[in-house]
Image (cartoon, grey):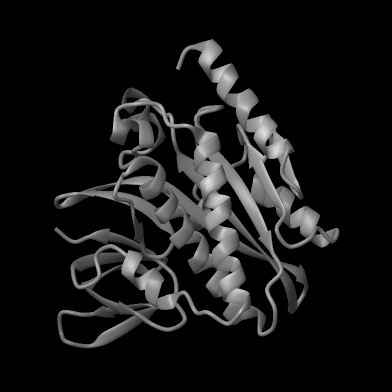
Amino acid sequence: MPTHQLQRSQELLRRYVDSLPEARYFAEIGSTNDEALRLGMMGAVNGTVLVAESQTRGRGRLTRRWMAPPGSSLLMSLLFRPPAPFARFAGRFTMACGIALADTVRQVTSVPARLKWPNDLIVERGETWRKLAGMLSEIGGAQNAPSFLVVGIGLNVNIPPVQLPELDPNATSLQAETGRPVDRVALLAAFLKKIRHLEARVHAGWNPLDLWREHLAWLGRPVRVHTPDGIVVGVAEQVADDGALLLRLDDGRVRRFPVGDVSLRL
């Protein structure tokens, strides 16, 4: 993106974020999740949103680094204060964020994004796939007494196709998928509207599990689950009520995975 267009995009995003209540914009930060966790310990309210143009210590799941050229993406963290029981509602808010992100991408760009268990946003291409976004949920509060949830999101927006291999072999971006730059303010505004609507429904007692399942890719298909102890293969049969993956092994047994990373088994 030419320098003047990049500067204009950054200025529009800054103005929009500055207009929001309980939102903060950073030209550069170590990690929006780290800052949200710090603010949460200081009493930041439910609904706090942090948005950054660049992260020097951005991270994804499983201790991976999250890298994005400055001004190219939506890098943000949202702070929730779930009601009791904390674990149940924290999981529901995380699911709601995934649903809102997938729906936003489809609404604004028509890219048929789907969720890859547990928290990635992908675009399927036949028997292959490319990653658009990642989510990282972290819990904060006093020891043994969690009081808030931080959900970090990194969405690849205007990264040219030529730059994607430098970030990750499986990476894609909305620009790469649509062939044109995408308005980041429109994306952020649509996402925040959707997540606030879903958050209100969760507070009213709605369980997003069934809708989250509908957004998941690869259910019923052969996959590999990468765990700290190695790779396990089987069919992704379903996800349990708490979000754990249920994998049917080749010998017919069903194994449960609360965490892990999934890829297609070709």
At a point 35% along the width and 60% down the height, the residue shown is: 116
Q: Nearer the viewer, residue 155 or 233?
A: 155
Question: Viewed as shown, does residue 258 lie left or right of 76?
Answer: left
At a point 61% along the width and 79% down the height, the residue shown is: 204
At a point 39% along the width and 82% down the height, the residue shown is: 240
Is 144 placed above or below 148 here?
Answer: below
Give coordinates of residue 93: x percent, y percent.
57, 68
Is 26 placed above or below 119 here?
Answer: above
Residue 186 makes an appearance in the image: yes
Give coordinates of residue 122: x percent, y percent.
33, 51
Q: State which quadrant residue 114 falls in.
A: bottom left
Is 187 placed above or below 218 here?
Answer: above
* Image quarter hosting the C terminus: bottom left
Q: Nearer the viewer, residue 242 or 106?
A: 106
* Image quarter hosting the N terminus: top left
Question: Viewed as shown, does residue 163 lie left or right of 82?
Answer: left
Furthest residue in direction right, as rendered: 42
Give coordinates of residue 255: x percent, y percent.
31, 83
At a point 43% along the width and 29% down the height, the residue shown is: 158
Question: Viewed as shown, does residue 35 lie left or right of 247?
Answer: right
Q: State which quadrant residue 195 falls in.
A: bottom right
Give coordinates of residue 17: x percent, y percent.
68, 38
Q: State which quadrant residue 120 falls in.
A: bottom left
Residue 137 makes an appearance in the image: no
